[in-house]
Every structure is written in C-alpha cells, then in structure tokens.
Amino acid sequence: MTIKTVGLIGAGLMGHGIGRNVVEKGFALVTMAHRNREPVEDLVKRGAKELGSPAEIAKASDMVIICVTATPQVEEAVYGANGILAAGKSGLIVADCSTAIPEATVKISADCAAKGVTFIDTPMTRTPKEAEAGKLGLMVGGDPGVLEKIRPVLSTFADMIIHTGAVGSAHQVKLINNFLSLGHAAIAAEAISVATKAGVDMTALRDIIMGGGGASVMFSRLINVPLSDDDSHAKFAIRNARKDLRYYTNMTENMPVASPIAEAIHQTYVLADTLGYGERYVPRLIDMMVKNSGGK
C-alpha cells in the first residue's frame, strides 16, 4: 500500500511542525482542531483539510499520526465514540508520536489489530524548532515492514529514525530518554540557581561548564535564562515533564527496578508544578529554585 493521505490528530506545539512538513513535501493532509485553532488554520492555508473527529480522519486517511499529551488522550482518540476504531477502516496504519505508557501501547495495538488496524509507537526527540525544520528524531516500535511502508512519511519530519523492536519498545526508550534529559535539566537548574545565589558570572559559568565534563545539551539551553531571560530553548511544559517522569518511575516499579534518582527528580517537577509553574517551560525550574531559596 502506498501512503497518499495522512491524518494528524494533535496539531499542537510539535504536531504543527509535523503536519507542515507532511503537507509541504507531497502528501495530502487531514487534521482537526482541539483547544488552539491557530496551528490548524495555518496548516489549512498550506493545503491541509480540516475534519471534525478522529473517526473522520481515519476514514479519509491511509495513515494517521497521533501527537497528543499522554496515554488518556491517545485512548480517547482510538476508543472514543468518534475515535479511530469507530471508523471501521481496515488496513489503516496509526503511528503514535505521543509519550505514553508502554503497557497501554501494547494493549491498544492488540485491540487495533483485532479490527484490522496497525498501531505502532513512534515517539519523538528534540524540540518544536526541529519539528518545524523536519529534523526530529523518531523511535519506532513495531513490524519493520510497517516502518518501511510509512518511512517516506516519517522522513518528511524526521532525519533520524531508529527501529527499537516490538510494539511498546519505542515508548520504553522514549521514557528512558526523557528521564535522562529532564534529569539533566533539573540538575542544571539547581546548579544555575546556586550560581545565581552565589553571584557567579553566568557567562564565565557557561564557558567553563560547556568546555568540560559537566557539559550537557540541557545546561546549554537552561543557561539562557539567567543570561537573557530566554526560556525558548526548551519549550516543554513542566507539567508534561512531571507526567513523563511518573510514567518512567511507574515503568521501573513494574519491572521491578529501583529508581531513587528518578523519584527525586520527579518530585522536583512536582514541587514546581504545585508552586504554580506547571504551564511554564522546563527552564523556569531555575526561577522556582531561586524563589524557593529566598531569591526573587
């Protein structure tokens, strides 16, 4: 089967870039609005067609990309009264770019297979900037043959596509990746907040850290907060980070594997969320830590 029409459920911060690249690089695109109409309206101007529900999108598509917040939203898109399975579209391929619970992904995939629908996990790395540029990284869990069928679509918005194994494995790898990246961010935020309290020259701190063993991508992004009050280098909400870390610690507990460091990191994000920073981007952990230590 050749993919001609692609459906997109979740045209948000990351989904807009995905949809833009899909429609501008040779595929028909159908999508739908949720809370924010602006990304969908922009995609329509670029040639996409707006539909009213996941079921309508499934009926119109050869492949559907889901890019939503978490497992409950994925389940609603699949199982809802107007969900993907309600369309009864046998032969459809669904690629889930969300960050989700691996065990739930396996169940959803099995339920879809019973209806003739192929469901695979294709979570992302990198940021909205790379989504717009068509340079996301993708992990893919599922049949390698299915990956090859949809690779031309995935390649419109990703320049790194890694097959991780069976369905659910990509969401496992994604949670491990996010534990590392969000953990690095929490450590960087604490270091920067200490430097702020100490009155350290932030340019000097950046140059020393990035030239040595303490360097990290997250430090390079977060240091822009004290340097220029710029949190745009890591556009990921603290509340979503909290969710991803809880998914990770639940996964380790179910194995079971002890994850005490992850628990401490998760509680850092819980604290930030409860103090009112949940909708702010991850770099604002610095603001929370400085304020929580008596700063401004």
Image: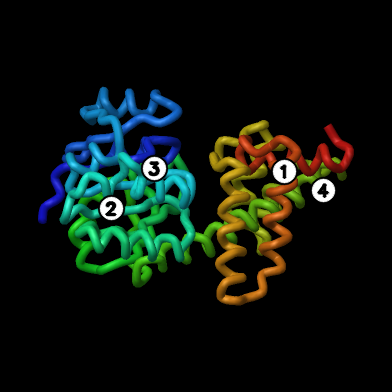
Confirm or deny contact between disc 1 and disc 4 (CB under 8 A): no
Confirm or deny contact between disc 1 and disc 2 (CB under 8 A): no
User: Can you tell which of label 3 and label 4 is closer to the viewer?
Assistant: 3
Q: Which residue is mark 1?
A: 272
| Mark sitting earlier along the chain (1/2) | 2
Residue 248 vertical placement versus 61 (above, below): below
Which quarter of the figure has residue 103?
A: bottom left
Q: Which residue is mark 3?
A: 131
Looking at the picture, tell me which residue is in the foreground, 145 or 88: 88
How far apart, in angstroms, are the residues tagged by discs 1 and 4?
17 Å
Q: Secondary structure at mark 1?
A: helix
| Mark sitting earlier along the chain (3/4) | 3
Report whether residue 132 is seen. Answer: no
Image x and y of residue 256, in percent: 60, 76
How far apart, in angstroms, are the residues tagged by discs 2 and 3?
19 Å
Image x and y of residue 174, in percent: 47, 60
Q: Which residue is mark 2?
A: 94
Image x and y of residue 210, in percent: 64, 54
Q: Residue at coordinates 45% horizontally, 40% vertically from top-left?
A: 128
Q: Residue at coordinates 66% horizontally, 32% vertically from top-left?
A: 228
Looking at the picture, tell me which residue is in the foreground, 28 or 190: 28
How far apart, in angstroms, are the residues tagged by discs 3 and 4?
33 Å
User: Can you tell which of label 2 and label 3 is closer to the viewer?
Assistant: 2
Question: Badge 3: few (under 14), some or many (20 or more) residues near its Cα, within 10 Å?
Answer: many
User: Can you tell which of label 1 and label 4 is closer to the viewer?
Assistant: 1
